[in-house]
Image (tube, rainbow, N blue to C red):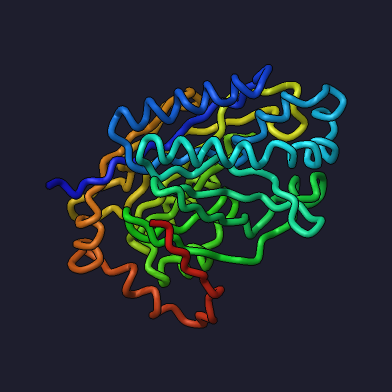
Amino acid sequence: MSTTLRIAAAQYPVSAPGAWSAVEDQLSAWVAKAAGAGAQLLVFPEYAALSLAALLPPAVRADLQAQLHALQELHADYLALHSRLAQRHGVHLLAGSYPVQVDGQFRNRAHLFAPSGASGWQDKWTMTRFETEQWGIRAGDALKVFDTALGRIGINICYDVEFPLLARAQIEAGATMILAPSCTDTVAGYWRVRVGAQARALESQCVVIQAPLVGEAPWSPAVDVNVGAAGVYTPPDRGLPDDGLLALGAWNRAQWLYADLDPARLQAVRDDGQVFNHRDWARQPGLGPRPSVQIEVLR
């Protein structure tokens, strides 16, 4: 039996649904398409949930603070929809991240769903200037690794993947895959995330999956412009692509990007690659303690 893992990274379009049924129809169609193509792990972008703001009255959706509070009413339905889809299609599914109110503060939270119905979440740790200075989204304080039937998975939401010690702590807790959902409004922003993602794949000899939000929503003060291309990145070493690009999507096009990964190849590189980045990490001078990591079982 093949041990190949098929990954689907969404270049998911921001939209303006007119009713909740349109949200269900769009997500259901996307998940069905990826599952029908054999994908076992589906990754949606950062802030893909913000299309839901189109369901709010115009004055609310145009107000950054008002929309955050109003979106809380839709959060439970959003999670329930993704949980049903993961179970229906037998896939592991990272939902588009959602601004969730926690103890009076908003966090940028991504939920991972298993086919069993189990789920867990990761909050973004490192906030952009827009999130901090204009929007009031606060940093999370729990770094996690999810123990799944596909292996151990860490999540670095967008800007987080530009900071190596977060991913490294997850790698040292056993993660072999880092999911990097992203939302960037400039080409430079996209490249910062991509360069960070590829660096994490190189230095820890792991796979990193970037899934961007794409398209324009002039009505939204939060996700009005979104650019990027999905990518699945590996270390450039024996048995893997020389440039570290296992797959790369078409620029700014709404699509699924598929990639087939043999996890044994990653392990072979760690065991007998041309170099030992993963092992030699500890040779760097001045390394301090990494953040503590919670391991959650999603099976």
Q: Examine the rendered structure and indicate whether residue 4 appears above or below residue 24.
A: below
| Observer-nearest of 272 and 187 | 272
Q: Examine the rendered structure and indicate whether residue 22 appears above or below residue 102.
A: above
* Quarter of the image where the C terminus is located: bottom left
Q: Is residue 56 left or right of residue 298?
A: right
| Residue in view at x 60 percent, y 21 percent | 21
Q: Position of residue 112 (x, y in %)?
A: 49, 49
Q: Is residue 16 left or right of residue 92?
A: right
Residue 201 visible somewhere in the drawing: no
The answer to which image quadrant residue 134 occupies is top right
The answer to which image quadrant residue 61 occupies is top right
Q: Total label count?
A: 0
Q: Examine the rendered structure and indicate whether residue 128 appears above or below residue 20.
A: below
| Residue in view at x 54 percent, y 75 percent | 292
Q: Examine the rendered structure and indicate whether residue 105 appears above or below residue 278.
A: above
| Residue in view at x 47 percent, y 26 percent | 28
| Observer-nearest of 73 and 33 | 73
In the orientation shown, which residue stands out farthest toward the right?
59
| Observer-nearest of 158 and 243 | 158
Residue 148 visible somewhere in the drawing: yes
Q: Is residue 122 left or right of residue 131?
A: left
